[in-house]
Amino acid sequence: MGGTDLRRRAGRAVVLRRRHRARARDLTRQLHGVVDIPWDLALEVHAACDLPRYTTMCRAHLPGYDALSPYCKGALFSLVLNRGASFDKQGPRYAEMRDIKAAIKRGDLARVPALLRSMKRIWKGTPDEKGLSARREKEAQR
């Protein structure tokens, strides 16, 4: 299978996964050990597609993103990669996202780590709590 065809199929699988998580999870388990995506190709797709896409989201939704330190940009990039650029969404689930955007706009970067930690409440008592709480903590330490 050529690289272009594999990239097209990988892109389609990502869309499938986002729309149909449970079905995609089952399919992933079935294909484990059957489908092998070479590491170099995965890195190429990540660098060519994911990095520019999520960097553009950060720039569009976070005023002053480019002026932030590399560590701060990395933490926010990770946040957007995981939660989307949901800085303008309403509801309690997105309160910290809105507050992060406001803090950055005001130049109050010292507030951001506490807001990242505060997000842990969202996953409390869920199967994802341990992993997502650890991820937010790592972002807050940046």
Image (cartoon, rainbow, N blue to C red):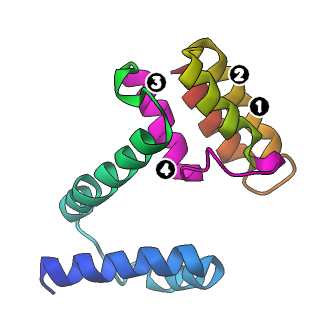
Labelled pair 1, 4 in contact (Cβ < 8 Å): no
Left or right, 76 with reference to 1: right
Query: Which element type, helix, strand or loop, lies under badge 2?
Result: helix
- Going by the numbered disc 2, the residue's amino acid type is Ala
- Going by the numbered disc 4, the residue's amino acid type is Leu
Where residue 88 sits in the image (x, y, percent)?
Answer: 64, 47
Q: Where 19 sits versus 99, above or below? A: below
Q: Earlier in the sequence, mark 2 or mark 3?
A: 3
- The one nearer the camera, 89 or 126, is 89
Left or right, 35 with reference to 21: left
The quarter of the picture where the N terminus appears is bottom left
Q: CA distance from mark 2 to mark 3?
A: 13 Å
Query: Which element type, helix, strand or loop, lies under badge 3?
Result: helix
Q: Earlier in the sequence, mark 2 or mark 4?
A: 4
The residue sitting at the left extreme is 2
Q: Which residue is mark 4?
A: 81
Q: Which residue is mark 1?
A: 118
Q: Which residue is mark 2?
A: 114
